[in-house]
Image (cartoon, coloured by chain):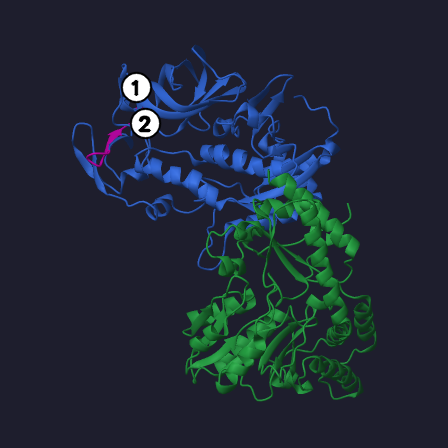
Amino acid sequence: MVETRDPSQIRVVVGMSGGVDSSVAAYLLKQQGYDVIGIFMKNWDDTDENGVCTATEDYEDVIAVCNQIGIPYYAVNFEKQYWDKVFTYFLEEYKAGRTPNPDVMCNKEIKFKAFLEHAMNLGADYLATGHYARVDRTDDEVFMLRGVDNNKDQTYFLNQLTQEQLEKVMFPIGHLPKPEVRKIAEEAGLATAKKKDSTGICFIGERNFKEFLGQYLPAQPGNMETFEGQLMGKHDGLMYYTLGQRHGLGIGGDGEPWFVLGKDLKRNVLYVGQGFHHETLYSEALSAVKMSYTTKAPKTGTFSCTAKFRYRQEDSPVEVTIREDGTAFIAFAEKVRAITPGQAVVLYDGDICLGGGTIDEVFKNNEKLTYVG
Amino acid sequence: MNTIYLDHAATSPVAPEVIEALASTMADIHGNASSIHTDGRHARKVLDDARASLAKKINAKMTEIIFTSGGTEADNTAIFGTAYARKSEGKHIITTQIEHHAVLHSCEKLEREGFEVTYLPVDATGRVRIQDVQQALREDTILVTIMFGNNEVGTIQPIAEIGALLRDHPATFHTDAVQAFGLEAIDVQAMHIDLLSVSAHKMNGPKGIGFLYAKQDVKFASFMYGGSQEKKRRAGTENVPAAVAFAKAAELASEKATMRNEQYKQFKAILIEEFQVAEISFQVNGHPTETLSHVFNVTFPGTDVESFLINLDMAGVLVSSGSACTAGTIDPSHVLLAMFGNDAPELRSSIRFSFGLGLTDALAREAGKRTAEIVNRLVK
């Protein structure tokens, strides 16, 4: 499992997005002497009425960078797979009142499945991406480690990768802090050196989230209430709100700011309350489904580790019990705010990302919270 | 690994004699063909010699040849030029579903402007039916634009029959002959063609030049405004060296047409033989006899074109499929779609080989072997 061949004998397909991270990933591999091929994935068509499509602009950047590095480049279209496997799931979850994580699904189903398969069909030995994560290859197991840049670590989104996938994966920039990546790009004069980082969900981009979602799902406006039943205003549709959210409620007045505390799907009511640390937002445990492990052997029984419940959150100490049906019960050492069904729970042992699953139910005082979605 | 170029229908290498003609004209002739002085007349002379030579190839008059920047401009000029010049007579246009995008997208633009366009279907060999053309004709049809030979599958359309049919109809008849010119015999008079598009770079000429044949009395509106070049039908200083090189390329093509057609048929036979020897499954698309000799479209069941094309490229076999779409990805071919219908396996698994200058029997055989090897690897 530890690679012993000369890099020139190793073909690496780099998934290139047209951003600085994957540009530098390709550049570093080429510097190290690998047989590098750059491939752009087109997953979404956002061509507007003027014929402008961000994918076209991104691909132009891929061409520029690949020509600078001196590697061949190609493009591949996964729009259909992305629609079927990621976007459909995304809409279904919103319909069910949950907050999905399409990036996790994209990594699981597209980047490290359909795209990995595509790379292997091209005779590649490895697939590399510009993710902030690391792989540690030992004689009998490959471990996925956090990226060294704690602020950028993307293992949260990669938690569904399996041992089999990790064996074929490289993360060439995971050992670098982001500013260093930018610096390398600038020193190499790469066309993407100063390109702005993409933000948000890839297919929505800079667009208004509400407007975007409204194109695909009917919004049903309803009431905003406190748990005590006081009417606080109207909401635009439950799918537009997520637990712990502050912005967009439009409730003024004195005292502490207002936050989303929960949803009642049957009555189409959005629960709101005052204060970031509102007691209702805190819970003690969760159950997770679709558990997947990066390690060679799946986790079993009860064990202690740390967990993240959303991207860029500090780890929380937890005790995990893997149930017989493969789902997990995860108890927190201390109460945690705004655990959101549909989001990923990701487990860590020190720097090693062990895997994770999808948050299904949330508990407090040994009771399931019914209002969290 | 050496590369084997099998994408001559996309563009072709420039013949050494053509490069020589281009370079020497560029070195020797520097006048503007519209200038009234000695150097201008000199430029005009070689330009018109080139024009006359090209005209002869399709049995047209010298004055009927309008130089353009290439096939796309010739198609656009023909279609928009006719539509705008004749809009008071009618607004109906007939074309086919398998035209080049230079034609299809022009027609679609006219539709958005209020014209009505009939897109004729084709049969499974890629041929339009005469009776479909006949049935689509209306009193207000002002333009029929149907390609001579298809760029993706090679099928040749019944141009003479369509021309004959249109003799009794006032519609202008345009044909895009970009792929056919130089290999197929074209006689605009015998075939009753009013407008015909040709490009130089598909037949070993330089890029950036083509021509539109426009029959003497045909009505069309100019597309470019400026100087009075090309009898006010196409403004812009003529590219004299390119025109001379274009004529040279056409000269070479016509001299060697019979020999090349035989040679290209042989290349097809060699590829088929290699596929059979390797025992891969394949299907040849297009028409068995009414076909351009240099275009060879093949379906390899079970392959996926995006992955297949990259593998071929990495093996040095340079071919293409469909047309490039946004962001470098490949759109399913509208030609195969018209021939085989939605969701047909051909849409995902077909490759176009196209032949030309520099290709030999040995190279064709080697390309066939490499292709078969990849198919065997991909189709498990």
- Quadrant where the C terminus of chain A sits is top left
- Residue A111 appearing in the image: yes
Subunit bearing disc 2: A
- Residue bearing the label numbered 1: A363
Q: Amino acid at mark 2?
A: Phe
Expressed as whole percent of the image width and height from the top left, the position of residue A356 reads: 45, 23
Residue in view at x 30 percent, y 19 percent: A363
Q: In the rendered view, tell whether residue B258 sits above or below residue A200.
A: below
- Residue A72 appearing in the image: no
Expressed as whole percent of the image width and height from the top left, the position of residue A259 reads: 29, 31
Expressed as whole percent of the image width and height from the top left, the position of residue A52 reads: 50, 56
Question: Quarter-wise, where is residue B160 in the image?
Answer: bottom right
Question: Quarter-wise, where is residue B157 in the image?
Answer: bottom right
Subunit bearing disc 1: A
- Residue bearing the label numbered 2: A276
The residue closer to the viewer here, B236 or B343, is: B343
Q: Considering only order in the chain, which callout, 1 or 2, is on the residue closer to the N terminus? A: 2
- Asked if the magenta segment contains residue A273, the reply would be yes
Residue in view at x 42 percent, y 47 percent: A207
Apparent side of residue B255 relative to residue A143 in the rendered image (left or right): right
